[in-house]
Amino acid sequence: MTADAQPRPGPLSGLRVVEFAGIGPGPMGAMMLADLGAEVVSIDRPEPSGNGIPRPVAFDVTRRGRRSVALDLKRPEAVACALDLVAKADALIEGFRPGTMERLGLGPADCHAVNPRLVYGRITGWGQDGPLARTAGHDLTYIALTGALASIGRAGQPPTVPLNLIGDYGGGGLLLAFGIVSALWEAQRSGRGQVVDAAMVEGGATLMTSLFGLAAAGLHRPERGTNLLDSGAPHYDTYQCADGEWIAVAPIEPKFREILLTRIGFDPASFPDLDDPAQWPQARALLTARFAERDRAAWCALLEGTDACAAPVLAVADAPHHPHAVARNAFIEVGGVVQPAPSPRFSRTPAGTPTPPEAPGRSTRAVLADWGMAPDRIARLERQGVIPTTPVPGQPTPES
């Protein structure tokens, strides 16, 4: 057994997962499991699919923490090889269009035939069935149907594209990881695996659950940018400082508003009533003018560390250097790339430092050996061209 195959630190140590490599939510879910100690093996195509955003492998950081096997799944010998890995796994992740894995001979029935305890995790945009199930899409198209996209943006402006955090990651990868761990818990009692059908359109809607409740209670208006949490309220917004930088303020509760207003030089008793939306424009004008009087560092010196609920709006390059992030080691460097550390944290079984993203196919022979394949079969598969030599010719290395 190689050093890479040794049990990893973290609460999921000992868990084995086979990931059929894709883009977006699948790699995020696999990363979450790997970060927390699972041994995740990624089955990659011998050649890039052309999907997603091209980048050098070292910067494709959601691929961190796992080894890669390259298999051409259009060949029956490669499918048999994949099923050998599946037979020894606890869980599987795939993110292809519905029906793709079945056509390859790797659908749930095929995999459960060799491993009845397998948790078969599927992540798609629309789910495994329904009128849109087989159509293409991306995060933005999925969250458009959830109410989330329509709710994000300023009054009188088009919906704001919120990166791909809601569908791909929060409502996709994290939902998938949660579903897999939940099914694994059930499998411990029943001895039986099952299929986890995670759909980004439903995960995005799940993230909107609280907003649906507020809307039903009449506490959230359908007009974008007119509510407490959507930039409508002046005390839950961002303001530009004298140096052009931005600060976020969010004192929703009256006791916190009083602290903010007092510290920035207003009398809370005479300030426009923040509970009255009719007075929000006046309050916003006062706050805009006040924050424009000093640079952001001066405001942070006055407000950070208090209950004013204020924080600097940091760029990606600046976030790792904030004193709070530094104190908690919230960011780490892996393979020369600064990135968020594994989270959440565990008191007794802390996660380790992830390994760098690996070039597709780099560990094919090592993984097959570690997972019990006989050396003569590995050599035969290589001679037949079913598996590549290591490293894969033409593929970037982790250092590139």
Image (tube, helix red, strand yellow):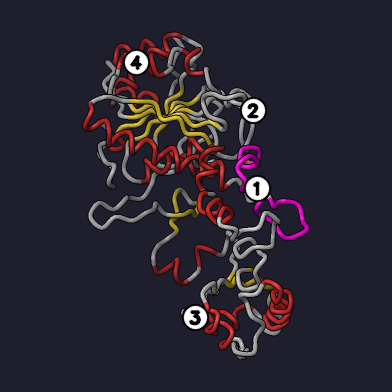
User: Residue 378 got which mark?
Assistant: 4
The location of residue 140, given as percent across then percent down, is 65, 41
Of mark 1 and mark 3, the one earlier in the sequence is 1
| Comparing labels 2 and 1, the label whose residue is closer to the camera | 1
Name the residue: 44% across, 12% down: 105
Name the residue: 71% across, 56% down: 223
Are the residues at dot 1 and dot 3 in contact (C-beta closer than 8 Å)?
no
Between the C-alphas of marks 1 and 4, the distance is 49 Å
At label 4, the amino acid type is: Ile
User: Residue 149 got which mark?
Assistant: 1
| Comparing labels 1 and 4, the label whose residue is closer to the camera | 1
Between the C-alphas of marks 2 and 4, the distance is 36 Å
Of mark 2 and mark 3, the one earlier in the sequence is 2
> Helix or strand or loop: what does disc 4 sit on?
helix
The location of residue 196, given as percent across then percent down, is 41, 30
Quadrant showing the C terminus:
top right
Q: Nearer the viewer, residue 51 or 56?
A: 51
Q: Nearer the viewer, residue 71 or 363?
A: 71
Q: Which residues are magenta?
A: 140-160
> Helix or strand or loop: what does disc 2 sit on?
loop
Residue occupied by mark 2: 136
